[in-house]
Amino acid sequence: MDEYGQVTVGPAPEEFLMSQFLGQSIRAVHRIVDHRIETEIGLRLELDHGEVRILNLGNELVITDTALPQAVEATLR
């Protein structure tokens, strides 16, 4: 994130996506690159029981376990 970005970490509610992965091992880490600008914008983590992507999209922190919009997915391949 640019110098104006901010992430605050604290206790997470049960419904927060990452809560379901607590205690699991990270099996693999993959870089996510936006090929339009040839820049690394995130990571895809493979865990014991699923995977999650953590991305910086337009200075917004995005955490998802589902596919991104098709237009965005196309730039990441």
Image (tube, rainbow, N blue to C red):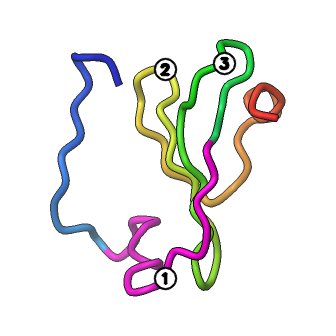
Q: Which residue is mark 1?
A: 25
Q: Which residue is mark 3?
A: 38
- Residues under labels 2 and 3: Cα distance? 15 Å
Q: Are marks 2 and 1 in contact (CB under 8 Å)?
A: no
- Camera-side residue: 14 or 7? 7
- Residues under labels 3 and 1: Cα distance? 30 Å
Identify the secondary structure beneath mark 1: loop
Disc 1 marks a residue whose amino acid type is Ser
Image location (x, y in percent) of residue 10: 16, 60
Image location (x, y in percent) of residue 5: 26, 25
Q: Residues within 10 Å of mark 1 (few under 14, many from 20)?
A: few
x 51%, y 74%: residue? 26
Identify the secondary structure beneath mark 3: loop
- Camera-side residue: 8 or 32? 32
Disc 2 marks a residue whose amino acid type is Gly
| Number of numbered discs | 3
Up-down relation of residue 39 to residue 77 (above or below):
above
The label number, if any, that marks residue 58 in the structure image: 2
Inspect the magenta stretch and tell me whether residue 25 lies in it: yes
Q: Residue 74 falls in which quadrant of the image? A: top right
x 82%, y 35%: residue? 77
Question: Quadrant location of the N terminus?
Answer: top left
Query: From which residue to which does the magenta span run?
Result: 14-31
- Residues under labels 2 and 1: Cα distance? 29 Å
Up-down relation of residue 27 to residue 76 (above or below):
below
Inspect the magenta stretch and tell me whether residue 5 lies in it: no
Q: Is residue 23 left or right of residue 26?
A: left
Up-down relation of residue 27 to residue 32 (above or below):
below
